Amino acid sequence: MKLRTFTCNKRLPNLLAGVAFSFASVGIAQADTTEMPKVPDSVQEAGVLKVGTKCDYPPEGFLDNSGTPVGVEVSMAHQIAKYIFGDEAEAEIVCVTTSNRVPALLGGKIDLIIATMGITPERQQVVEFTEPYAWSSQGMVVRSEDDYTSLEQLKDKPVAFVKGALAIPYFDENYPSIERLQLDGVSNAVQALMTNRVEGYAHDTPILMSLVSQNSKIRLIDQQFKFSLRAAAVRPGNEELLSYVNSSLKRMAAEDRFRDWFEEYANDENMEVKLNFWDMDKKPNS
């Protein structure tokens, strides 16, 4: 298959309880049929949909052994292109990071962000979000050999963050004494932890779960914080594309595609738990 790609305070056991997943209750409502709106003229004329995705965030977006971006959100981008053009290869995947995805969108390098982007009031001032398709919490990983069990124990110690992450303002407000080392990308944050530059690494719980499953030298502490909704984003005023993507998300849910993609890219002992984050009924109230 030809693909257009450009590389570039809750407790955890409460979340893990009852992980049976039902797409009937996902945030994007299911329907037997989804009427698709008009394809935006700008996209139709370009003949390609440029989508920014993460490329260091499994299972949502990462590079396979050949260097091709793959993953759940990458598959979402290809599926939207298939709805538009009849060919999923007409999605041009552009690897983005938390810190550069909005500038890439506003600068016209991409048409759409599908990149683990949480909805915040600040971000709503500069982009237009679709309906949420998933939710997330923030968590903390530490070295397995260390005894940390709570955020309180990390006061006055250095912690790694990916630049622009949702966890940063939370720590600014609630744990100002924690030293915040902001880095570019997940791999740099993990390396800082493994080389003892920091005592912890705070990020979205789903990505931390994936990292822990791949690395026995780190573990997730039993504390979550800062719950958020995840959505795709378009440039302000691009109402046609916003409407089309919203309809596409509903159609994907109706076609049961999310589970298929998780089975392809995250088929491990934690798959059902990760799918929980795509079930809006399982999002905590705070």
Image (cartoon, rainbow, N blue to C red):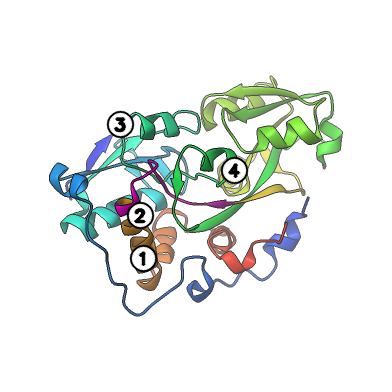
User: Residue 177 location, x and y as percent?
Assistant: 82, 25
User: Residue 56 location, x and y as percent?
Assistant: 46, 36
Residue at mark 4: 121
Mark 3 or mark 2: which comes first in sequence? 2
Residue at mark 3: 109
- Tell me, for residue 76, which label it has, or none: 2
User: Residue 149 location, x and y as percent?
Assistant: 82, 42
Q: Quadrant of residue 243?
A: bottom left
Q: Quadrant of residue 49?
A: top left
CB of mark 3 within 8 Å of CB of mark 4? Answer: no
The secondary structure type at the circle numbered 3 is loop
Q: Residue at x 48, y 59 (%)?
A: 133
Mark-to-mark CA distance, 3 and 4? 24 Å
Q: Is residue 237 magenta?
A: yes
What residue range appears in magenta?
A: 229-240
- Tell me, for residue 252, which label it has, or none: 1
Q: Residue at x 70, y 67 (%)?
A: 17
Front disc: 3 or 4: 4
* Residue 152, visible in the rendered structure: yes
Mark-to-mark CA distance, 3 and 1? 25 Å
The secondary structure type at the circle numbered 4 is helix
Q: Amino acid at mark 1?
A: Met
Mark-to-mark CA distance, 1 and 4? 27 Å
In this rendered view, identify the residue nearer to me: 23 or 260: 23
The secondary structure type at the circle numbered 2 is helix
Mark 3 or mark 4: which comes first in sequence? 3
User: Residue 204 location, x and y as percent?
Assistant: 61, 44
**Vertical comparison of 203 with 259: above or below:** above
Q: Callout 4 environment at 10 Å: few (<14), some (14 to 19), or many (20+)?
A: few
